[in-house]
Amino acid sequence: MATSQKDFETAVNQVKLLQTDPENEVKLKLCCCCCCCCRVPSSQLKLYALYKQATEGPCNMPKPGMFDLINKAKWDAWSALGSLPKERARQNYVDLVSNLSTSESSSQGKPGTDGKQSGHDAVVVTSEDGITKIMLNRPAKKNSVTTQMYHEIMLALEAAGKDDSAMTVLTGNGDYYCSGNDLNNFTDIPPGGIEEKAKNSAILLRKFVDCFIDFPKPLIAVVNGPAVGISVTILGLFDIVYATDRATFHTPFTHLGISPEGCSSYIFPKIMGPAKAAEMLIFGKKLTAREACAQGLVTEVFPDSTFQKEVWTRLKAYSKLPQNAVRISKQLIRNTEKEKLHAVNAEECLVLQSRWQSDECVNAVSNFLSRKPKL
Ligand SMILES: CCCC/C=C/CC(=O)SCCNC(=O)CCNC(=O)[C@H](O)C(C)(C)COP(=O)(O)OP(=O)(O)OC[C@H]1O[C@@H](n2cnc3c(N)ncnc32)[C@H](O)[C@@H]1OP(=O)(O)O
């Protein structure tokens, strides 16, 4: 759905009201060194750049002198958007404002408090009946994962690992479980160019996957619809995967000029055999829920009409089991492989860092992003 001028103007007004918290860890992580030294938070620079791109198009100002730090940082941020179309800049501006507003409200909430909802709009964390639920909540974008969401999920997992719940569930809101990495993440190029972007993304991905490898309690995926990309690969790191019969499992990595992540290059051949794993990870074969179950990626498939009821009834019963025994058993199983999984994760991220800079990847992502809007 295209962002209207009205959405854009609402976001512009919202920015005027927004109070950013300079101590907020998520936002600090988004800072680049040049913004730190000129004391302009990176989120403000991004807002500035997207606003200028959305209203004036590509950067048309002469480059400020190297000692004019603030204007140089602004110029860099705007120029980095290259020829991003005005419409896409408006959309990114609205998304960023929405992320900043919600992350600000989440910093005031406390994840994992029984019965309460906290957190970011695009990642909603609730805790009830001894189960902490992390729900991807961007249904209009098929729950694709923005950079901000990777940070939110990591924070949610860190809190869930320490709260008093028995288990943690990851699920999606709407018709999709998750369509993988938000391909717009690749359009937000920092001043250091695509090389810096690839390096930062590899660091982020490695930390993200590490959180799943090290998660101390049972981690359950409630796959409520189709799953794509990273949302599929990390399933190998879950303890249980329940899927609706509407779900599909798709890893179109080579179509995107990239390579597998989430430790799937090691876990998938191990659980489904090298031949089946190759068809999925190299050739992008999409599996139905039943096929994924037959190949050991999914624990059990339920009819869509009874999926939520059956799954939550089952999980509530499991959450009443003796918690220490459950945790210790999970850790026993995981510990035998932990070191190997971290090594695989590091290697996959290194390979991806170079793939993201390849022509094959750049062309595939720009083809997706320049698709004609649906009527
Ligand atoms: C730290 C970095 C880690 C990187 C690691 C991860 C690797 C991956 O995850 S690779 C996989 C990336 N995902 C994809 O390639 C999927 C791309 N999307 C699609 O192919 C289709 O959108 C999909 C089959 C999921 C759904 O198709 P439709 O049912 O026809 O819906 P739409 O295409 O109209 O989608 C609605 C709306 O959502 C936007 N969308 C969906 N997925 C993504 C995505 N992954 N990235 C960005 N945007 C996405 C889509 O563009 C539509 O937007 P509007 O046009 O604005 O409505």
Image (cartoon, rainbow, N blue to C red):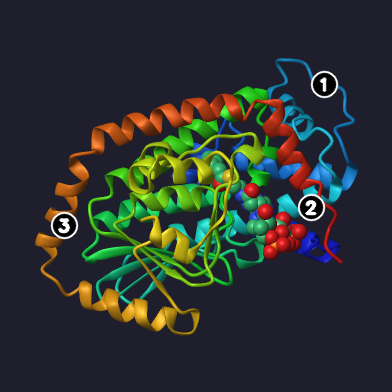
Tag 3: amino acid: Arg
Q: Are marks 1 and 3 in contact (CB under 8 Å)?
A: no
User: Residue 72 at x, y = what percent?
Assistant: 73, 24
Residue at x-position 58% and y-position 60%: 143
| 195, above or below 307, in the image | above
Disc 1 is placed on an element classified as loop
Q: Earlier in the sequence, mark 2 or mark 1?
A: 1
Mark toward the viewer: 1 or 3 = 3
Q: Is residue 92 left or right of residue 37?
A: right
Image quadrant where residue 330 sits: bottom left
Q: Are marks 2 and 3 in contact (CB under 8 Å)?
A: no
SS for tag 3? helix
Q: Amino acid at mark 1?
A: Lys
Mark 2 → mark 1, Cα distance in angstroms: 24 Å
Tell which tag, 2 or 3, sits nearer the viewer: 3
Residue occupying image coordinates x 70% and y 16% = 67
Query: Reading the chain from its start, which is encountered first: label 1 or label 3?
Result: 1
Which sits earlier in the primary sequence, circle 2 or circle 3?
Answer: 2
Gap between marks 1 and 3 measured at Cα: 57 Å
Residue type at numbered disc 2: Arg
Residue 360 x/y as whole percent: 70, 30
Tag 1 residue: 63
* Mark number displayed over residue 90: 2
| Image quadrant in which the N terminus is located | bottom right
Q: How many marks?
A: 3
Front residue of 284 and 243: 284
Q: Which residue position holds label 3?
A: 327
